[in-house]
Amino acid sequence: MNSALAGNTAERAHSKPRVVLGVTGGIAAYKSCTLLRLLSKAGVDVHVIPTPSALEMVGKTTWEALSGNPVYTRVTEGADSVTHIRYAQEADLIIVAPATANTLAKVRWGLADNLLTSTLLAATCPVIMAPAMHTEMWLDEATVDNVAALRERGIEIIDVATGALTSGDIGAGRMLEPEELADIVLERLKATRDFEGVRIAISAGGTHEALDPVRFIGNRSSGRFGVEIARAALRRGADVCLVAANVSADVLAGAHGAQIRRVESALDMQAAMREEAGSADIIIMAAAVADYRPSQAGETKRKKTGESLQIELVENPDILAELAAHRGREGQMVVGFAAETGDEKASALDYGIAKAKSKGADVLIVNEVGATTGFGDVDTAITIVNGEGKILSQAEGSKSRMAQHILSVLRERIN
């Protein structure tokens, strides 16, 4: 299944991979100038975050000149865009080189006392740390414990090299050479760009079904989850089209780099998704599509009459089932969302599994929603099932993290 995804060789334009280079106050900071130049030469967009003590080793002007990007050192700089969050959200990978014993300890315990540690605390991308310190510090029980804890957490700690140290001693504690670190970073970036050459069409938001030129039937969907999936897919190298139903501009800004198609109603979305299905390798129907629409929309605003108003509703098309039944191309993967609520008869998951079996999609993401859960900028819990209703994965957390999790599950199902 989905052989077209693995074999698609169509050339598509992608933005440069983005790496944050954290530099701490070790003498090996001068080597990171070479690391920066090697990564830039390889086509990587590098943003440097030096700690205040690192600037005593290499100045801010040097980092700006070598990277071609502005350099910030304090959380209060770039406050209008919340710099540490922006760096954390937009980076494909973060490498800290050199990583002092002090910074290893701070990251282990979640301290955020400068821009670099704040960014690391907010990061969802892979993180690599290249330690550099004297042998006794590297072998100290506290450092050994911190390194083990960070590795357990999923942070990649590069082993130190043995050689001459600044004190004139010889032993373990040298940072790896810039050429070796550059090779590691470029290799890891290949893994983070695991959707290169894949086109994904994603729907997001909630459709509005017109009653008249002023009023409509709608739902609470903000489109944030679909936008987060689009953002994550872009970071992983995909070519993304986002079909956005009534998504606000501030939310849509998160999908910078995607092709945006704005729609309003379910019929608008049906037409747009049909069109996008012709070239998409993966279709993700994350939008909350209204089940019904008024049979007729008034040409003028309805006036109050003092009497009850009856509106005839007709069913909207089942866009997900249609896309699953009529694939736009061979091997296309179709993914649906089931925003469900439980009741006295069954749970939200039960309803989601039943929907998975009836829709014909390859994968369905079930999430429980309500007046205060599921919609908007809140954490969410998801269950991912296949077309037969078998549970593939369960996870919970921010929509940003869940978007990454969903894509990882989909990646595993691509032959």
Image: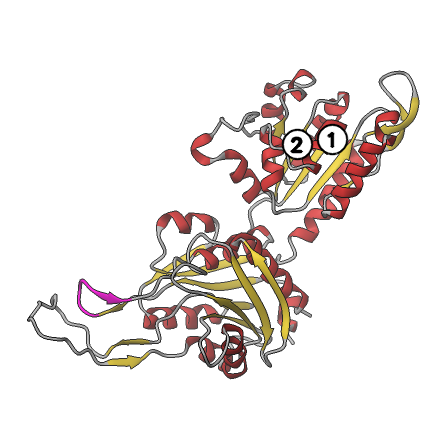
- For the residues marked 1 and 2, what is the alpha-carbon distance in whole angstroms? 8 Å
Callout 2 secondary element: strand
Q: Tell me the residue that label 2 is attached to.
A: 22
User: Is residue 372 inside the magenta stretch?
Assistant: no
Precedes in sequence: disc 1 or disc 2:
2
Name the one closer to the observer, 140 or 233: 140
Mark carried by residue 273: none
- Can you tell which quarter of the image residue 142 is in? top right
Q: Is residue 342 left or right of residue 172?
A: left
The residue segment tinted magenta is 211-217
Question: Camera-side residue: 331 or 288?
Answer: 288
Would you say 116 lies left or right of 99 here? left
Residue 217 visible? The answer is yes
Amino acid type of the residue tagged 1 in the rendering: Ala
Q: Are marks 1 and 2 in contact (CB under 8 Å)?
A: yes
| Residue sitting at x 47%, y 29% | 78
